[in-house]
Amino acid sequence: VRRRIQAVRVVNVFLFSFLLFWVLSPGSSAQARVRKEIEIPGIKGFITLKCDFHMHTVFSDGEVWPPVRAEEAWRQGLDVIAITDHIEEKYLDHKEDVRPGQTDHNRSYELMLPRAQSLGLMLIKGGEITRDMPPGHFNAFFLRDTGLLDTPSFKDAIKAALDQGAFISWNHPPYPKGKSVWYKEHEELYQKGWMHGIEIVNGRDYYPTVHRWCLEKKLTMLGTSDTHAPIHLEYNFAQGEHRPFTLVFVKERTREALKEALFKRRTAVYWNKTLIGEEKFLKPIFENSIEILDPAVTIQGKKRKYIRIRNHSDIDFELEAEAGSEAVSFYKNLVIYGDRTVLLRISGKSGELSGKKKIVLPYRVKNLLIAPGKGLLVELEVHIHFLPGTKKN
Ligand SMILES: [Zn+2]
Ligand SMILES: [Zn+2]
């Protein structure tokens, strides 16, 4: 009997210690839920929102449970996502597993919303209206009820979206044939003002033809992931890859301001480490990223000097000289790495110059695309005090 009492005491002491440890423990030490911000300097008068406007979940042909999409986006530094599950029966791959016997097109949004709100991520309710080409696939954003877009007729679906004040974009125009064709169906939508934006980037693909259309027809430029699998299965983030996203320049951080900016075409696209957009957006982004730490140097004769250039953004700017200079020689190619300071070597050309001169080095930034194949032209300005070289020099 005594032995049994002793055994019970030992167990009690053990349980008490465990309880004490549990009560006093500082909590979980899991640190995996971390957000990486994307540094891209802003434009005067606007807030830059980083947005992915196209993605799928198990509620259409995706492979991800809705709240996971919100957390993926938050961790990758995005501010806004739109959920755009396909509406048509044909693409509801998991419907018998997800909700047997009933289809609710608003459900993926509802499931995502609490997670998005807890992370401070703006969530936009959308849907992908999906038909064979032409007209192809269209996303509608800012919906109240996605279910109203579930109509046999394509035009009725578009109308149901427009009735809700939706913004409508044409998705991946070259799909499925690999060639971008502007059919009469698209012309009709465009003429009616039923097409507001267009994807010039979808996933890993950039479409130069569509980029040209977007500029000519004054549509809003979008670049989206259209992710179906878990995002980490689609991009090798450890190797520095990133998902494509759209930058939207808003007046304030609200849904209404986002919508206003989309209709006013204040967007740019970041894809494959390349920023695509109109010059009026890309130029200030470059200028606000770059700081010349040695804006004034002295050069004697043909000697060389190094100018330190700091890049405050996360984007590696790839520069190629547009022209030479009569006064100095300088690098033909220069990469100004993101979040780094690089050295630009310049040296006196003639050895005969003297006095102070402002020198402008013209470069094209190859990965700041203002039109298909056309990089942004920038000027790096340095003030040089030239001293004549000695005879030996
Ligand atoms: Zn699609
Ligand atoms: Zn899609």
Image (cartoon, rainbow, N blue to C red):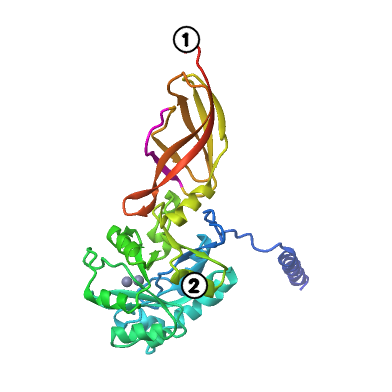
Q: CA distance from mark 2 to mark 1?
A: 65 Å
Residue lying at the far bottom of the rendered structure:
101
Above or below — where is 163 with respect to 25?
A: below
Q: Which residues are magenta?
A: 316-326
Q: Any mark on residue 131, and which? A: none
Image quadrant containing the N terminus: bottom right
Query: 263 or 383, which is in the foreground?
Result: 383
Callout 2 crowding tier (Cα within 10 Å): few <14, some 14–19, many ≥20: some
- Residue 338: say if magenta: no
22 or 251, nearer to the observer: 251
Badge 1 local density, few (<14 within 10 Å), some, or many (20+)? few
| Location of ligand 1 given as a quarter of the image | bottom left
Does the residue tagged 1 have its C-beta within 8 Å of any atom of ligand 2? no
| Left/right of residue 306 with respect to residue 30 in the rendered view | left
- Which residue is painted at 48% across and 69% down in the image? 261
Nearer to the camera, 356 or 21: 356
Identify whether 317 is placed above or below 140: above
Extreme residue toward the top, this view: 392
Q: Amino acid at mark 1?
A: Lys
Q: Say whether disc 2 or disc 1 marks the residue closer to the N-terminus.
A: 2
Foreground residue, 55 or 57? 55
Q: How many marks?
A: 2
Q: Position of residue 3 (x, y in %)?
A: 75, 69
Up-down relation of residue 80 to residue 295 (above or below):
below
- Which residue is identified by label 2? 260
Place of residue 31 in the rendered image (x, y in percent of width and height, measured from the top left): 59, 58
Q: Circle 1 — which element?
A: loop
Q: Which residue is mark 1?
A: 392
- Which residue is at 29% across, 57% downward? 208
Mark 2 is on which residue type? Answer: Glu
From the viewer's perspective, tell me whether residue 121 is left or right of residue 317.
right
Callout 2 secondary element: helix
